[in-house]
Image (cartoon, rainbow, N blue to C red):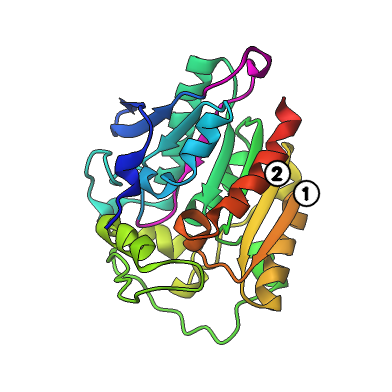
Amino acid sequence: MRDYARELPEHMGRYVGENDLFLKIFPGNCRPDEAGRPPLLFVHGAFTGSWMWSKYIPHFMAAGWDSYCINLRGHYKSRSVDFTTVEFEHYLEDIREAISAIARECAAAPIVIGFSMGGILSQKLAENVGIAGLVLIDSSISRQVHDEVPYQDLAPEIPGLVVPAPVRDEQSSADETPEDIAFQRKYLSMESGRAFGAFSFHFGAEGISIDGGKIACPSLVISAVSDETGDRRGRATARHIGGEYLGLWGTTHTGLLVGQRYHEAVSRIMIWLTRFD
């Protein structure tokens, strides 16, 4: 199996905050004309960690972007915690901690790039935390978007206090090779059931309310799309926060980060980032 996390360029790491959140730091190869750019903060989704960004990071480093990857409490290389006590709000505190640490170090607020659960967390933070920009990659949807384009025929499961890691026993997907899936299978871990119970409609949640009018920074929404309804949800998310939209048809949720077409999302983000030069 190819382990993309072990192929990352040279980087640093440190623990921040009282929960020992492990922050991976990837300095960009910037030219003098690229100085003054805001840093990037990557926020992973449920069950994962900074390793999920392994295919993305080299591209942003090469383009001169200083990149930071948070590991939320209890995830990957952050200190272990009792997941039965972890709430959605605790993860919000973790991201605030990372944003504060980055802003102190760089004298600039970061652009936040959130995937899946990290996307709904990042939207909620953007209501009242000053950030330079917001990118959502197949984000979990808000209560308002679900009201507009609801999931149909759900049979919601009530999560336990801890949700086990996804099995991923399939060998491939529409845009992932067996190697891509094996990479994820190596690192996927358990998740907080309380957090899931707050945002996931598949787990019976009422959803997280997002006040799109409070999100003043520029934003971009990228969605994995397999049908018209999924495309409508992505467009509704972008409209709700006043952002640009890209729907990538024929891609999958995790494939957008580690699949064979991940570079299409990276390319669109790079174009969107030129506004900060």
* Residue situated in front as seen by the camera: 58 or 145: 58
Q: How many marks?
A: 2
Residue 159 horizontal side relative to residue 198, left or right: left
* Residue situated in front as seen by the camera: 192 or 26: 26
Residue at the disc numbered 1? 242
Q: Nearer the viewer, mark 2 or mark 1?
A: 2
Q: Is residue 267 visible?
A: yes
Q: Are marks 2 and 1 in contact (CB under 8 Å)?
A: yes
Real-space CA distance between mark 2 and mark 1, rounded to the nearest whole angstrom: 7 Å
Q: Residue at 64% of width from left, 46% of height from top?
A: 267
* Label 1: element kind: loop
Reading the chain from its start, which is encountered first: label 2 or label 1? 2
Q: Percent position (x, y) of residue 112?
A: 57, 38
Q: Identify the main secondary structure in magenta.
A: loop
Residue 162 horizontal side relative to residue 204, left or right: left
Residue type at numbered disc 1: Gly
Q: Residue at 58% of width from left, 29% of height from top?
A: 110
Q: Place residue 206 in its image quadrant.
A: bottom right
Q: Place residue 1 in its image quadrant.
A: bottom left
Residue 93 horizontal side relative to residue 139, left or right: left
Residue 219 badge: 2
Residue type at numbered disc 2: Ser
Part of the protein shown in magenta: 29-47
Q: Quadrant of the C terminus?
A: top right
Q: Is residue 192 visible?
A: no
Residue 165 is a magenta residue? no
Q: Residue at 23% of width from left, 38% of height from top?
A: 79
Q: Percent position (x, y) of residue 264?
A: 62, 54
The residue lying furthest to the top in this view is 32
